[in-house]
Image: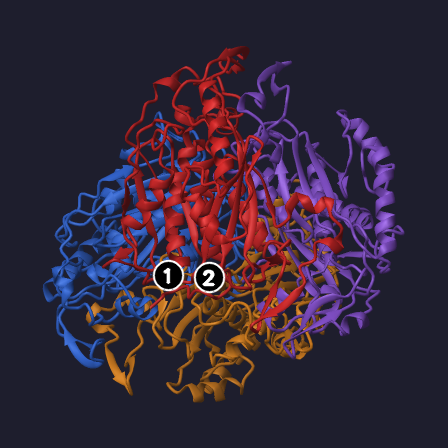
Chain colours: A orange, B blue, C red, D purple
């Protein structure tokens, strides 16, 4: 029952299947007067598109976005903005043979059981390709947030057990992550991670990892207790991305190894502004932002499309056990491609809460 | 802006401040014909109420629930069910002195900044006491789910770094967790955990921990892609509990240390039913339940109400740095009291999705 | 499926059955800092309560409201406000005999068919008594709107075909409607209406009527196209009141007898403010308020609880035709009691749209 | 703030401006397994498209729909269905001169005031052209309802004061309305109505009218008290159409001229089925369908685009009074073109409530 809309004030509704005609999104609730054109969207889409490095899927999609509504004279109208990305390099042949043989860890089986009729080509609606629509919507949210100086940084901090050492300085992080395709702020670790990915790729295997996100310059007061707390909505937003299997805020799971007295963010005054010297809480107290950076981490599972061996499955027509081999074009490590999607979902959530908390006028920026 | 409602088909709206008149909840969307009386609710409330062991807050609340509507002749009517718990043992005196001196890691500061006017007594709306309303609503959800044989198990698996070894057998888990107030399935670990809590209590300190949740007998097909995926909604539900700072599904953060080939849940047929031998995915694929148990873990932070030392804060009236001492009645380890709250939020989410997926008739069970 | 919540930013959730324990409401989304106490609510409840004139139901309910949450130190907290009205003068005996014999034009039959189990006492949830909760919520909305100078006037303009002549001057209307219990602005017509009601009452019959509503000092810009237009939301709000069977805006159904050229509200400047000399459109263009008074009319059906004769119905247990006589305590004309309910629903809708359009800060008035 | 989505289970989100790139809609919540192709949609679009008779706007739009998602192998997937209609015959020149001179009774002024930046070309988002997206969505709803035998009949019953006499027999109505473009079931009245429209057209004037709607074969039990009553949701749906200024159910405004005893729909048994001989209530009791036909009427205002004279308005740039002449291509009577839009909104509302009440499985028809 109708689950393709996210957000209450800045509302995003996506559509599209991996091998269908097109994917896209309607953004409803962006105020009027925001300067916006297709290049703002395209820039973000280019960051997640396939075919850009030897490590990612070789499907060749230009991912050209077309804005169909909501913009006039270079500015948003306050009306719904529909954006469409037509599919171009669709090759459905490899999927014919898995039509009734669900791939392990994929959504084939659950879509089949739930809907009875499903699009098995390239994962259909469950494909990672669905996230192109999120990135398009996120690009608008980012542009809107940039007017309020809010910035989202997402970067790789772990791949296959190799942990990055994250610099304290935001500037240092920003500089380093632009220097490697994994967006890892520790350049030595990045090199080792790449080597592991290369090895996995050669084996037809895949690797997962952990992404850290920092949201900077967040005003205090975002988040609506007790259910639409900022952490709750961010968790939902990020957990709705297919590859993500966990999320933590501030010290996260490490909290279970600490005493209360060791993790208190005590207050001080910094030129009349209330701040905390530490940020174990990750910028959120009682579900409401406190003005410190919001910090969280999300885990990306290794893609299940591996080629190291045959996989045991069920022939759904004959209801008997069988085996399949995965073919098609896949990424050995999708972490770098998930990063812009995480950024997009974070941006959408923040834009939603900025309007809900009264920081952004819901009608117009003019 | 209005964030106190959770759920779309089974809709829960809570109200109440820690030291106000009462706390409570309206459950809207429970079908007619469910046998229900106050004892069904009371049983669950008794599990989270304060004053039941030496380790938990000594505030004495009987937490007597009163059902005000929605039930007639012992059965639900399909109309909204309002339940109220009046506050009894309210002692606001200890809070007078922190009125304008926000406690670190508490919501005092964010409520003050967001609303300008807030109830500083006992945390007001941000108090853990708010969860009594969730547990009441969860009791109805649990009763409803029990008609469909769905069972929720939640238990402690880690406290202050002491990890429990979780038995494979569900029966073993169920038996063990009833034997200790931490609901830890490993009795040896439970003993060590209790010792650490005792030590922390003596120091005026507090400890956090990790709770694991298993949902058994879940039918396939629950979860509404692409945003209301089951994982996304469970994450939101659980992350909306004040003390929780992270959540993971299946293998969770461990996925970042594995290759794809190591974590595939391959299919087999078990008497004509499609199953997987492993369950790294935690019972959910593509955001939809696959019929295997749903497995997740959540981290509970140590309560910030510690008494080991004075804490640095700001006098908000005079806007200068100062110090406070925490007094009042607090728990050294809230993990056991969070467990019924987690169960409640899981039950509410499942009830919501059972209706949304068409398994439960939204009008009536009769 | 869950239909007891109205509003998106100023969210109202009601509960309660006519002969149950209590009725009440949670208002979620009222900003912090609004001065509010029980007397603000009580004043409005007293306007709709039964037993106040010989023409209305003789059920004796004091309708004492109790605020359970959301207020502290005389001001709203921005947290949910729960208000409860306990039932006192419940006499369920007259309803025993219609338990399985649905009264024509009542909701008995539809509740029975939909839910299988229903509360037949006094109409249960479908009773007009349910509206006490709406009036309580409306009292808060009115208080909030009064800060922004918005005023709602509702008055009787027709009873059993007797039409009132409505004065042009708002002051005249305000003065006259306080002079008769029907709140009719035409005192001569009011007298004739009362005579007809007296006659109907003696016959055990009932009468309907038409209520006109004016909303004054509405800022331009309220209403969110294309579905949450102001007219659409007002129509929904008012049509959700049991007794209402139609609604019209501005010239309403009269538009079908006019040419376009006859009903144009042309613009002029009044001290630099854009106004229209006529107001055929009723203050709304394209679903958005234009700054002129909003004008609408709603029709109230005669109550179906009549005693002039036996009524044909079905014995649901034996599934055969039978007859019943209506007893119990009923109003010969509910129009005056519906008026405060209409005002409440209008106030709630306006408060919701004032927040949605950014006129009221969603967090706090302070 | 985000008002372009309608429905909770069958959710419709529209986009598009009159002279923009395209208009369209996402339908989210249609179950899998419904046979559907573009011709199902096109048939409905053709009924409302401009340029089909001498009485309607001469804008030449083929209104070719393109389905971008949600369909595979000729059946719905249960995923969102996006449909797009590209604009072709756009002529924006006539609108240049009214850019800052709002047309009376149009939304020009309110969009300008609300959003500051708006698309003045052809009414932008406020154009009647927006309804093409509703009709596309309605076509899917209709197809879905047809599986459950539900039928929607809408026809003209009044134009400029000329009232049609409506046959009792549904078959007679169906037969007659196909015989005239006004879809009037009284052929004599239809002729007179056409003459009046012809006269108005020659004068450059416009006429309004009343549309009656019957929904046949509705199961009992649709509608979710107390706010999402069937009448409330139908009222909202229909009142959200730009040209509509009033709606009534059953006897409607006539109820104010009747005694309670005159309008009772008493029950009888018809082959074991509970029915009423009369249907003053219009098929809904207590906000829930009772199994009788749902009957309502809506009033359509005359279009404000008239050419009989110059119209007084304000030059918004110079803030002084001025005059404009309306040009462009307009309909002298939009009633016949509003009819398919009303049908669409009714169908969407019914589909939504059929799912909400558990009559339609939300996942799949298979």
What residue do we see at 37% from left, 68% from top? A249
Task: Give the residue at the far left of this rendering.
Answer: B202
At a point 39% along the width and 82% down the height, the residue shown is: A165
Position above or below: C286 against C186:
below
Location of residue B236 in the rendering, given as x and y in whole percent from the top left corner: 42, 57
**Residue B65, position as x, y percentages in the image:** 25, 40
Q: Is residue A346 left or right of residue B181?
A: right
Q: Quadrant of the N terminus of chain D?
A: bottom right
Q: Measured along the vertical axis of the image, is residue C94 above or below residue C362?
A: above
The subunit carrying tag 1 is: C
How many C-alpha atoms fall within 10 Å of the one at disc 2: few (<14), some, or many (≥20)?
Answer: many
| Numbered badge on residue C355 | 2
Q: Of helix, strand and loop, which one carries label 1? A: loop
Q: Residue furthest front?
A: C188
The residue at 59%/75% (across/down) is: A33
Is disc 2 in contact with disc 1, using a CB cutoff of under 8 Å?
yes
Residue C150: mark: none
> For the residues marked 2 and 1, what is the alpha-carbon distance in whole angstroms?
9 Å
Residue closest to the eye, C273 or A195: C273
Give the residue number, with chain letter if any, for mark 1: C31
Residue B211 position within the rendered picture, expressed as x and y whole percent measured from the top left = 32, 55
Residue at x-position 82% and y-position 32% = D186
**Disc 1 packing (10 Å; few <14; some 14–19; many ≥20):** many
């Amino acid at each position: 029952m109708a689950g393709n809309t996210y957000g209450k004030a800045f509302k995003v509704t996506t559509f599209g299947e991996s091998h269908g005609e097109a994917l896209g999104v309607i953004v409803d609730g962006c105020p009027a007067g925001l300067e916006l054109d297709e290049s703002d969207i395209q820039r973000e889409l280019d960051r997640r598109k396939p075919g850009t490095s030897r490590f990612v899927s070789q499907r060749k999609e230009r991912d050209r976005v077309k804005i169909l509504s909501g913009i006039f004279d270079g500015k948003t109208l306050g009306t719904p903005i529909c954006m469409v990305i037509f599919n171009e390099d669709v090759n459905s042949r490899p999927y014919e043979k898995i039509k009734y043989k669900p791939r392990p860890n994929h959504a084939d089986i659950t879509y089949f059981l739930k809907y009875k009729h499903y699009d098995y080509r390239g994962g259909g609606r469950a494909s990672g390709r669905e996230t192109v629509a999120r990135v398009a919507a996120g690009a608008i949210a980012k542009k809107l947030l940039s007017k309020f100086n809010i910035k989202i940084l997402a970067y790789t901090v772990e791949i296959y057990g190799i942990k990055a050492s994250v610099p304290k300085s935001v500037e240092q992080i920003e500089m380093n992550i632009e220097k490697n395709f994994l967006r890892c702020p520790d350049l030595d670790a990045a090199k080792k991670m790449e080597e592991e990915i290369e090895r996995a790729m050669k084996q037809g295997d895949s690797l997962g990892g952990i992404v850290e996100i920092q949201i900077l310059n967040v005003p205090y007061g975002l988040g609506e207790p007790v259910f639409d707390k900022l952490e709750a909505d961010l968790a939902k937003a990020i957990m709705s991305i297919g590859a993500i299997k966990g999320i933590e805020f501030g010290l996260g799971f490490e909290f279970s190894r600490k005493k209360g007295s060791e993790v208190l963010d005590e207050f001080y005054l910094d030129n009349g502004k209330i701040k905390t010297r530490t940020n174990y809480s990750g910028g959120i107290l009682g579900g409401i932002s406190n003005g410190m950076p919001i910090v969280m981490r999300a885990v990306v599972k290794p893609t299940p499309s591996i080629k190291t061996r045959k996989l045991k499955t069920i022939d759904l027509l004959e209801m008997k056990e069988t085996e399949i081999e995965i073919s098609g074009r896949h990424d050995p490590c999708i972490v770098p491609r998930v990063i812009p999607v995480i950024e997009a979902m974070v941006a959408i959530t923040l834009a939603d809460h900025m309007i809900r908390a009264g920081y952004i006028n819901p009608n117009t920026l003019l």
